[in-house]
Amino acid sequence: MMSAANPVRGVDTLRISDHKPLITYAGDKELFENLKVVLSQSLSQESIEWRRQYGRPMKMITLSTEFVPFNKDAVAEQISSRNLVSRPIMHTFWTQCLDMEVYKSLLRDEIDKWMNEMNKHNIIDWVIVVVETYDLRKHNKLLPRTTVFDKIKSDFAEKKADRCLSVINPPKSEVRCGSSAWRALITNVRLLILSAFDRLFLKYEDNIRNYREQRNDPSWSFCKYFLYQEELAFALEMLGLHDEALIQYDELDAMFTQFILNSQVGNVPQWLTKFQGALERWSAVLFMENISRKQREAIKSRQLSLLEFRCYLFSRQASLLMAASKPWHVAERALMFLHQSVSDLKTLEIECPQGSVACWVLQCCAQILVIYKSVKKPELLEECSHHTAPLLYYSLKKLFELGELCGLLPGSVQTTEQLHTVQVLCSGMQSGHDLSAATESVATLKTTLSSSEHFSKHYLDLAELAISTYKHNKLMRCAHSLVGLQLAKFYTLSGDTTKRTMFLVQALKLFEQDNWKLLIVQTNLELVKCFKKIGNVDQFVKTCLQLASSSECNMQVRQDHFDQMLSMIQDSKTEYIYPIDNVIVLDQIDVKSNNEKDNYPSIVTLKFNCNLPKTIICPKIAISVVVGSAMKKMKNKFNHVRSSYSYDIKKGNILPMAYNHIYQQDGHFASTGITCLNQKSYLRRQDSQRRKPLTNYNKNNFHDIISASNVAVVPGMNIIDLTLNNSKNIESGIYFLDKLSVKLEPRLELLTNIPFGLMFALKNVNSTAHLDIHDKCLFAGIEEIATLSLQFGTKSKKIVEKIRLHSTPGLTFCLEDETEYSSEMYVKSPISINSSNSLTLPIKLFAQLPSLKDHPRTAHHKLWIKCETSSDDEDIICISIDFSLPLTITHRLHTCRYRKFVGVNIACHTDWSLALCKPEIIGISQLPINSIVKLTSLNSTLDSITHLRNGEVIGYLWEIDLSSTDTIGNLAESLVFNFHTKYSSPKKPECFHDLNLEFTVNDYKTLMLIDSGVEMAGKSGEFCRMNTVCLYTANFKRTELPNSAPNEISFKYEIVVDKTMWAVCGRGSDVITFAPNSVTQSISVEVMPLMSGYLPIPTLNIFRYYPSNSRHNTESKMVPFSSGQVYNASKGVQTHVLPRVTTDTS
């Protein structure tokens, strides 16, 4: 029952926000009226923490209470009523009696009567408040031992001391400021109120639970249970706990839905049959600030339709969400609410007039949009917009359905029956509620149904709002694929093919990017009609090609579109180039050669699957290639990080999925889904920037190096061999397969990029020649037998008329059947050669021995092979041939005082022995007069043949007759010798070859004689001893005096010793000077032998010395003598060194 103290908006409405928890007061009413306002303000001044039982979350509550006088006649009715809002939560008794006699005579009886009423109705939530007032002027009067408060507590609250409170009534100024006693009273009253609510809610919830457990009773009613639990929601909403109140409505919603679902497999409860009546009203009221009492009475009497009950339930949920400042949850729940309501109508098989459900949905959507308009905060509006777009799309579909039913779509003419349907729908939308949002939505919908023009305008406005909302939320897929397709259907009826095509193309792009194959086919079937109607041949052919190769279409549709495509191409004169897409799916590409020895690949095998419905003769199939360096630049230019796409997943990479079906206990199918067995391997969802890229194909610089003509391509798997054209313009290198071109018709070509990484190496090998020798190496001056092998290169494919051989000077050759050696020769034998041919020619080589003056170890020669043809193209091959020398010759000048000797040594380096004979030498003196030098041979056998093996050396020696070189009393300045001998090899021992050496000897005259020795210092004739200083002496003698002006001549000497044998104690080097007429000179230097035995005496080196003080020399320098100008007579002489003398200490 509604208390008169609670204000309401009207007799038939109830507003929970205007209600407050009720508290009765009794006793001294005049006293309470003075404290009532202050008490109410103090209770609601601060929030208090409410900890409910059973682990429920803690809540902060602000208690705004209302005090009403205690009415003993209404207590029984209030307690028996289930109305928690108008039911007092606590009862209070107020008194300010301080006189014990007055208490005993009057007050105790009054309190006793009040307590009897409490006990009579089992009320335990009561409080007795004693307000004590003291006269400050009588503060010297002794206080009584027992006060009235103590007496009341002992008489009525002996076991409930917290129910009896005392507060000092301070002056008014202190009341406004608040005292500690007053704050204690307020705190205790708050706690007692919360304790009362706890007990009330627990008892009420137990009653609800007990009644819910009786739901299998045939007389049980959900409507009664709904009102019962709704009272709990009202009480929680009254306390400001909107989320707790919303939970109660959510439980009721879920329970009602479950009853409807269970009715499919079991008996329908009696109360549910009341909702199965025919639908007569389809007005929608989704948001009411005031609760209609008529609706609650209709629920109680089961006179509310299913849609009305659903609207009432959702309106209560929406009101609580708006009160909790969560408007986006209203939008989030709205679409689910609409779908659930429509599903309930189908489940319960409720008879609905055609279009009535669509009208109801449109009203609901319109009212929800009106609710959003009341939201002022931008952040809340942004949250709401995320859920508004699907709602708008749903209403757009229902509006189209309604227009189709009523004949309001473009191009339709309303019939009498359709006009009657409009009148029926409008009559069923009459609302008996005074709600501006509902009235506005009904009026808008009626206007929309009034004419085709109004319908079209409203439909397009709603579509524009839906598509803009989707775009605002960055849901481009939904904007074009959902709303766009709806608009395309609308423009199909209106005859605007251009706009229809625009929306279909936008949707098709999204479907292609996300690889929705069935949606692509459905959209293409619509687009092909549009393209044909507007005359867009290019897009018509492309779309027909896609439909013909789509496996989602039946074969008849594919063949029809394939024939239409061919017919359109034949009538057109334009060339069409399209991406290959799914028309042809590459499976394997192999590059191979017919000949394993051939370096030139000749065949490329294509294995692909053709999705066309018929066999077609392709005029040409070609593959272009890109050289490796160019492909690397292209890869660097377009390099980007790729992500995994659905179209990239191969059959072997499919995730291990399993179906997951969920059934209820009664066996009813609940839901289904898929589960990944391996949770660690899953495909992450990519953002819209990682979609399948749209590739643009062009035919710029397409060189069909690999091609085949007139190829029959059948539906299904095909294996085709393409020929690699043998072009001379192709250079060696790595080639990547770039693009594949398939010409289905002369003016219809398909292009695709071949995956990066498919390549082949092309090696254009030039013609080569190789000389195969029988031995390890070739020797100059000896006839050698070898084999000349010619290998023709990859570009050689011609007729060779003759082969020309020519060599460097000094190298001659002949074929095995020839007898004469020559440096140029022709092989006249016309042969047909290509990269698989080779030619072998036996050849004999003879390289002349080079000049041995500089002692070369190897003779380098070249042999050129030139293949001459009738064309200008000629191959020239060059072979480098190295010949080793079989013999090496060295010469040396020997001196014995004034006598001179010439020695020649010959060393053998062949693996076989060489025969030498007739060694001869001729000497010629030069300047001032050329004359022959007489030489005396010191060789034992000159006419016999000497055999030299590898590593052996033979020497020849001749003495020079100096008198033959002396002309006018002077020796010649230089002598030229020409050594000559003959040699032969075991291969041809009868064939001897000449071996010559020419050399020159300069400064051969002896200019100085040196005689040196070592003797004991100071003791002539004694042997040197170890570690004893000895004297090294050297005598120098000039062989002649200079003819020029008398000048001093200086020489510098250096004593060189083995430091392990000798130690130089004196000056090891110095300059000696010869006077102009002096011939001899001597030096003495102290040395010490470091070991005993026969030791070689120190070595003496002598140089010409030119001091720095001379006119032409700014720096001093030493110039060594030439070989033969200094003769050291003591070279190689040893001296006997005795051990050192040891003294016997014994």
Image (cartoon, helix red, strand yellow):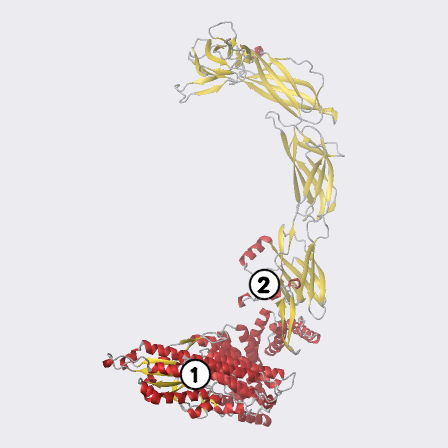
Q: Is residue 10 visible?
A: no
Q: Amino acid at mark 1?
A: Asp
Residue 1102 in the image: state x and y as whole percent: 49, 16
SS at circle 2: loop
Q: Quadrant of residue 897?
A: top right
Q: Are marks 2 and 1 in contact (CB under 8 Å)?
A: no
Front residue of 784 and 1035: 1035
Neighbour class for label 1 at 10 Å: few (<14), some, many (≥20)?
A: some
Which mark identifies residue 250?
Answer: none
Mark closer to the chain start, 2 or 1: 1
**Residue pushed farthest left?**
137
Q: In this rendering, is residue 1013 above or below 204? A: above
> Which dot, 2 or 1, sits closer to the camera?
1
**738 with respect to 285 (left or right):** right
* Furthest residue in direction right, as rendered: 817
The image shows residue 247 at horizontal and vertical percentages of: 51, 79
Judging depth in this view, the residue of 35 and 997 nearest the camera is: 35
Residue assigned mark 1: 125
Camera sees residue 269? yes
In the image, 915: left or right of 418?
right
Q: Secondary structure at mark 1?
A: loop
Task: Name the residue beneath numbered marker 2.
Answer: 644
Report the amino acid beneath label 2.
Ser
Q: Position of residue 476 (x, y in %)?
A: 53, 73
**Residue at image point 70% right, 74% down:** 555
Instruction: Classify 10 Å Cα crowding around label 2: few (below 14), some (14-19), many (20 and above).
Output: some
Q: Nearer the viewer, residue 30 or 933?
A: 30
Asked if 593 appears above or below 26 in the picture, the reply is above
Horizontal placement of 438 versus 732: left or right? left
Residue drawn 55% across and 92% down? Answer: 303
Q: Is residue 1123 above or below residue 666?
A: above
Compute the Cα span from label 2 to label 1: 69 Å
